[in-house]
Amino acid sequence: MKKMKKWYLALLTFALAFSLAACSSADSGGSGEADGVQELTIKISHVVAENTPKHQGALAMKEYIEKESDGKIKVQVYPNSQLFGDKDEYQNLVANNVQFIIPDMSKLVGNDPGFNIPAMPFLFKDDEAANAFWDGEKGQEIFKRLEKDGVLGLSMWPNGAKHITNEKKAIKTPDDLKGLKIRTQGGQLLEAIYGDLGAGSTSIPFAELYTALQQGTVDGQENTYSNIESKKFDEVQKYMTIMGHTRVDYALLTNTKFWDELNDETRKIIEKGVEEGTTVARDSAMDLNDDALKTLKDRGQVEIHELSESEIDAFKKKLEPVYKEWAEKIGADIIKDAESKNE
């Protein structure tokens, strides 16, 4: 009887130890496996609509990661600020309440001045040059500066070059902007640009911009073709100038603690998913902007002027002081590298 009791106690102890080990393993980030694909649930949050390059890129990430992990990794995509908005998504990424966010880089200028790169006037000639910079050494260096916050920058997803619309007059020279009030995304660099051009600038939430233009709260705004067309700003603006003077670009960010806890096999799948998402987002942005410009021309509601090379040179000359000042703030080596991507 005593032997039976000892055997029973030994069996019970073994079972309890096994149970505790299993619980501990299951609670350590969703995976109990040192090898093999980890079982995870990943959240991707962004603030724009479903019919955007950003959302298409996020869906491509989801599709690839879930397929290649045989469903062990679940990816939940939350568009339209359903999970977090502009004001709180970064803090929630730091807290690992979400694993990926894709903010406009203008939202990151307070974290590092390098994220002013998209607002540098006439810095990149096209999307390919901007992509090459962020994929390169100096762009990745800027991304790495977020690691102090527990954030890892992975990739740039473009929206594209910006162009100016307004209700007052055709913009062909720097002097044409004098006295106009232009809505921008905000930030000291954009304020400096429009200040040097003799225009006022103000930041208005994007969702409120159509009404602000309609009511004359501002005379005009700057945006990508796709944003101008999809929000039908041509209904409340008479003139559009094709400039490409500044850009809207996004940063795909993740949480470093989440990233560091991935094993090699899992990380490889997610890294490849990021690559797939980046390709789709970049291709979609280019196609969407091309289609949007064609639609704006077909609708014929706005008078369109494309700046000539000589007209662009006049704007560049006017903005030389602000360019020089902010090149020093961002870093001469970084600006030199960015300029080299146009060659």
Image: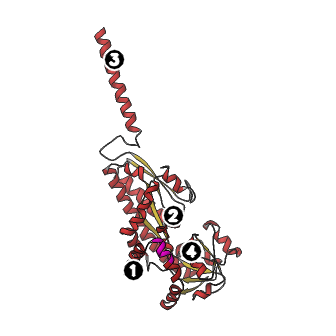
Q: Earlier in the sequence, mark 3 or mark 2?
A: 3
Q: CA distance from mark 4 to mark 2?
A: 14 Å
Q: Position of residue 60 (x, y in %)?
A: 41, 60
Query: Circle 1 is placed at which residue position?
Result: 342
Please name the residue that numbered disc 2 is placed on.
108
Within 10 Å of disc 1 (Cα), the crowding (few <14, some 14-19, many 20+) is: some
Q: Nearer the N terminus, badge 1 or badge 2?
A: 2
Question: Which is closer to the viewer, label 4 or label 3?
Answer: 4
Q: Which residue is mark 3?
A: 9
The segment highlighted magenta reads 325-330
Kind of residue sitting beneath label 2: Leu
Which comes before the other along the chain, label 4 or label 1? Answer: 4
Could one spot residue 228 in this view of the protein?
Answer: no
| Count of picture labels | 4
Q: Are marks 1 and 2 in contact (CB under 8 Å)?
A: no
Tell me which label, 4 or 2, sits earlier in the chain.
Answer: 2
Check contact, mark 4 vs mark 2: CB within 8 A: no
Residue pointed to by mark 4: 190
* Of the two numbered discs 1 and 2 in the rendering, the one whose residue sits closer to the viewer: 2
3D distance between C-alphas at marks 3 and 1: 75 Å
Give the image quarter of residue 151: bottom left
* Identity of the residue furthest to the left in this view: 3
63 shown above or below 16: below
